[in-house]
Image (cartoon, rainbow, N blue to C red):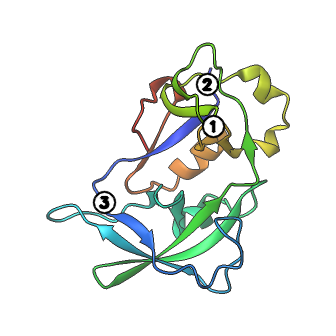
Amino acid sequence: MNEYYLAIKTTASPLYDLMDWDDIINYPWNVYPNQPLRTYSSFRPEGKYTIGEYFSVPAVAFSKRIVEEAGLRHIYGVNLVPTIVEDRKQQYEFYYLNLMVNKISCMDKQLSKYRWDDEYQEVNAIKSLVLDDNKLKKIPLQKRLIFVMAEDDITLYHQTIVDRIMATKPVGLNFVSPDAFRFGMS
């Protein structure tokens, strides 16, 4: 049985950009800003839309409500960076999940389907994903509850974290198993 899942956005909602990097001590996400980062909607869907409680661009982020209700504040390797999301003159409180320090190489390169970039010697795009359970089992569970897959910067969530997040009844968020993952999902 699969223990890991990928988060996907399930509602049509805006794409976001950072307003300014001036308040960030270090670039890019391994940061402790002196105030919440300000993010704005740079592209909005046509018509009415709902602001979901998850987005993945410019970085993985959850609403403050989900972070607090699911108890995500003290997960190994996760630095929560507060951000204010502005959309149509309204503001929403979110947290970016800074996972740059918690990268794990766990893709089964024999069974996964992916495109290899010869120039940079790295995985360029994953078409279908299979995880290497043996690699994951060598790492203590508390160090792999939420992490970034080193091969392609995909964030993975352990089943216990998925259960905690889904118990909050999030708006615009669902999780898929790696075997259901297809290129372009996020």
The residue lying toward the viewer, choosing from 69 and 128, is 128
Three-letter amino acid code at disc 2? Answer: Asn
What is the tally of numbered marks visible in this picture? 3
The residue lying toward the viewer, choosing from 182 and 62, is 182
Location of residue 182 with respect to 143 vertically, above or below: above
Q: Are marks 2 and 1 in contact (CB under 8 Å)?
A: yes
State the residue position of label 3: 13
Q: Are marks 3 and 2 in contact (CB under 8 Å)?
A: no
Tell me which residue sits at (75%, 41%) in the image: 144
State the residue position of label 2: 2
State the residue position of label 1: 159
Q: Give x and y (percent) for residue 4.
A: 62, 33
Location of residue 91 with respect to 130 vertically, above or below: below
Quadrant showing the C terminus: top left
The residue lying toward the viewer, choosing from 102 and 141, is 102
Three-letter amino acid code at disc 1? Answer: Gln
| Mark 2 closeness class: few <14, some 14–19, many ≥20 residues within 10 Å | few
Q: Give x and y (percent) for residue 124.
A: 53, 34
Tell me which residue sits at (64%, 32%) in the image: 121
Tell me which residue sits at (43%, 69%) in the image: 17
Image side of residue 87 versus residue 97, left or right? left
| Mark 3 closeness class: few <14, some 14–19, many ≥20 residues within 10 Å | many
